[in-house]
Image (cartoon, grey):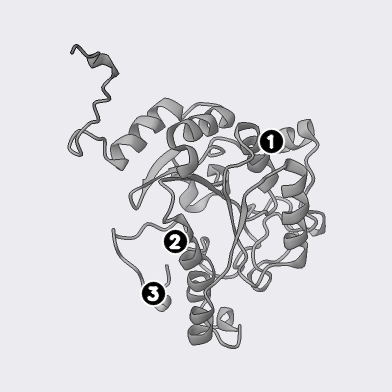
Amino acid sequence: MAYDQTAIEVKPTAAQQPTARNLAARLDAELRDAHPLTILRKAFETFGDKLALVSSFGAESAVLLHLASQVSRDIPVLFLDTGMLFGQTLDYRKSLAAQLGLSDVRDLRPAFADLAVTDPKSDLWRTDTDACCHIRKVLPLDRALGEFDGWITGRKRFHGGDRLRLAVVEESEGKIKFNPLANWGKAELDAYVAEHDLPAHPLVSQGFPSVGCWPCTKPVDDPNADVRAGRWAGQDKTECGIHVARAPGAAPNVGEGI
């Protein structure tokens, strides 16, 4: 009996499948000058339900979340509820998610065991901010990302520091990371917010250009200061650790300062 060979799906072998690094390089070459919405559509087309968006629901978060909602309101949104957030951020997370119709916002919290052993008095931030970020942000996110192959961040080059060299698409520990807003500056963000009448984080009007955990975030008086000047003010620290690359399979100890 004859059969139609064209109907047989021939899957590539493992050796033929592109590595994550090769895939990231190809996607970055394709998308490095693309509009954020085009980048998000490509990310969703490539990974589908294996794609997540990580959001702090902070000062600039509404733009990326609104863009993503135009691609799919069902994209999982991972929100790190560290237990140290401003009440205004928690309220904003609820109201903005409802306004945009986001159907799958997941609140990621630090493991009870990690807190009980390492930060039982909730004052670790006073002596070791890196360790505090590790148990409250890095570990919960690492656990949640286990079920995804690609993820989306809101990082931008104009934030400075290590972000100046930020690629639109990059490989991170075997996963593909998309940075759709890498090319946008404050002018583009402000224009998008105005065009779509997006609500601001309540603390922005109180002088907070960037909003993180309350112990490590302060308002900024200088309008010309770096947008992240109020984060870990007076310290060399500029990142919480979730975007710091680690060796494959490595699981740093809490005090390693990632």
**SS at mark 2 in the image:** helix
Which label is found at residue 142?
A: 2
Q: CA distance from mark 1 to mark 3?
A: 37 Å
Above or below: residue 228 compared with residue 19: below
Q: Mark 3: which amino acid? A: Glu
Apparent side of residue 184 relative to residue 176 in the rendered image (left or right): right
Q: Mark 2: which amino acid? A: Asp
* Image coordinates for residue 94, horizontal then vertical, percent: 75, 55
Mark 2 crowdedness (10 Å alpha carbons): few <14, some 14-19, many ≥20: few
Above or below: residue 33 compared with residue 81: above
* Image coordinates for residue 257, horizontal then vertical, percent: 42, 72
Q: Nearer the viewer, mark 2 or mark 1?
A: 2
Mark 3 crowdedness (10 Å alpha carbons): few <14, some 14-19, many ≥20: few
Q: Measuring 22% from the left and 15% from the top, which residue is drawn there?
A: 5
Above or below: residue 113 compared with residue 156: below
Q: CA distance from mark 2 to mark 1?
A: 33 Å
